[in-house]
Amino acid sequence: MAAGYSFKNTSRAILTWFSLPNTNIRPIRILIALWAIVSGMLVWQATSVARETVQLSPVRFGDFLLELPIPARDLDILLFSIYYLSCIGLISPFRTRTFASICALFLTYYCLLDISCTPHPILLTDIFLIALLFAGKEDNATRRIIQVETSLCYAFAVWHKVIFADFFEGYSLKAWMGDGRVLNHFFAGLAQHLHFPIWAWGLFSLLTILTESFFAVGVWFKPLRKITVITASLFHLVIFFMFPDYIMFYSCLMWTGLLAFVGKDSSWWQEENDAQARFRDERSGIEKPFNINRNALAFAFVLLMFAIPARLFYWPGRSGEDLSALDRAPLTFAMFVEQDQTVKAKVYFQGADGHWHSEQVKTRLRILSSDNHLYAVANAFMRRNPDVKHLKVAISYVANERRLENKVLTIDRENGSERRSLRVTYVPLQTIDLVQAGLVKH
């Protein structure tokens, strides 16, 4: 028996867990194709913003900011045309993996271009498109990837909220919803006439955490799966009617993800029983036929989808309190955790005369406050002024209407080498009078 529980058998058992039948796969694929069309429209608009202002890449490795070339407008038209035709082709039952590949490559590339192309629903659409690449006539990993990613959305949303004091205490939701600024027209008018004490916002925040925790975990237990999927669907129905724009779109993606949990039997659990039986057989050395290479890729992809958002919780030298809302993107699903209002953004540089000069930054720093944006502004300035050897990019912003945060990126070029350092300071968590501080007018 001990020999049967070998590393090989355990590995095969883990990989076979990814195999699920194609239950509901056709409506899931059609929905993903429709959301891909909507995502393409949003990406078109976002690309125009990136082209006309400072390009803000969402990907940075230390001091290196990955800035891919933005296609020319004429090439954009060709690429988007191919993309939309592939979305339409994805609705048909023919060559779906080919069309899904084209759509996934397109969205992945444009999401890497600029952070404005990476709101949650667009990224989820891209992940679901990649999941379709694992489809086949036999049991496959498509639905399992969608299931895991849907659960991770809730799990990471909870993780962010629990470790961030502002949300737990109610200040985050108060900043976002207190004046109704993120709600649709009807609910915004209602919110403007309601003034809840901070303890009420804290209670609402706790209920949100508990609800999303239930959604993240409940789908993986037989007695809870059906009630969890139904409750989560109703939860997103409320969100759909309360919030405008891309948050409504986010609900559509979550409904699609929840559909992957709906099984072929009345309990929605027979497929899990089959997966558990295969797992036990494989661990005991009874090998079952399945596409081991494809499932291994699925396993690696799921690990990547976990590692990217998890990176935030192991940020060297930084606490969660001094990471801006946009530092938490992409793939962190940290909705309503922090609202930032940039109040100052300047570039300081030492000119050829040896004196320091400054320029007001009039680009997207007015509304964005991430570390990546400082690097993007610095790179754009250095490209325009290659002779500048000493540069500082400084921003100040108010987080959740209650504390002031400052970021300064310093770049020094000496003897052909370059040294970069980022310094972050912030007023500890406490309420500040924005009017008295001169940051907000009466």
Image (cartoon, rainbow, N blue to C red):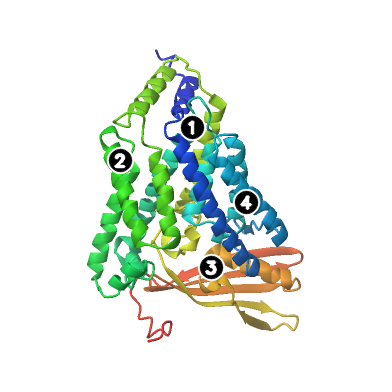
Of tags 3 and 2, the one toward the viewer is 2
Ranked by sequence position, the earlier of labels 3 and 4 is: 4
Give the residue at x 52% y 45%: 33
Which quarter of the rendering shows the N terminus? top left
Q: Secondary structure at mark 3?
A: strand
Query: Which residue in the structure is indicated by mark 2?
Result: 218
Q: Does 430 sit left or right of 319 as displayed?
A: left
Query: Which residue in the structure is indicated by mark 4?
Result: 109
Q: Is residue 288 above or below residue 35?
A: above
Q: Amino acid at mark 2?
A: Gly
Q: Secondary structure at mark 1?
A: loop
Q: Amino acid at mark 1?
A: Ala
How far apart are the two marked residues, 1 and 3, measured between alpha carbons?
A: 44 Å
Point out residue 155 in the picture as x, y percentages from the top left corner: 38, 47
Ranked by sequence position, the earlier of labels 4 and 1 is: 4
Ranked by sequence position, the earlier of labels 3 and 2 is: 2
Of tags 1 and 3, the one toward the viewer is 1
Point out residue 254 in the picture as x, y percentages from the top left corner: 40, 48
Q: Which mark, by number, is residue 423?
A: 3
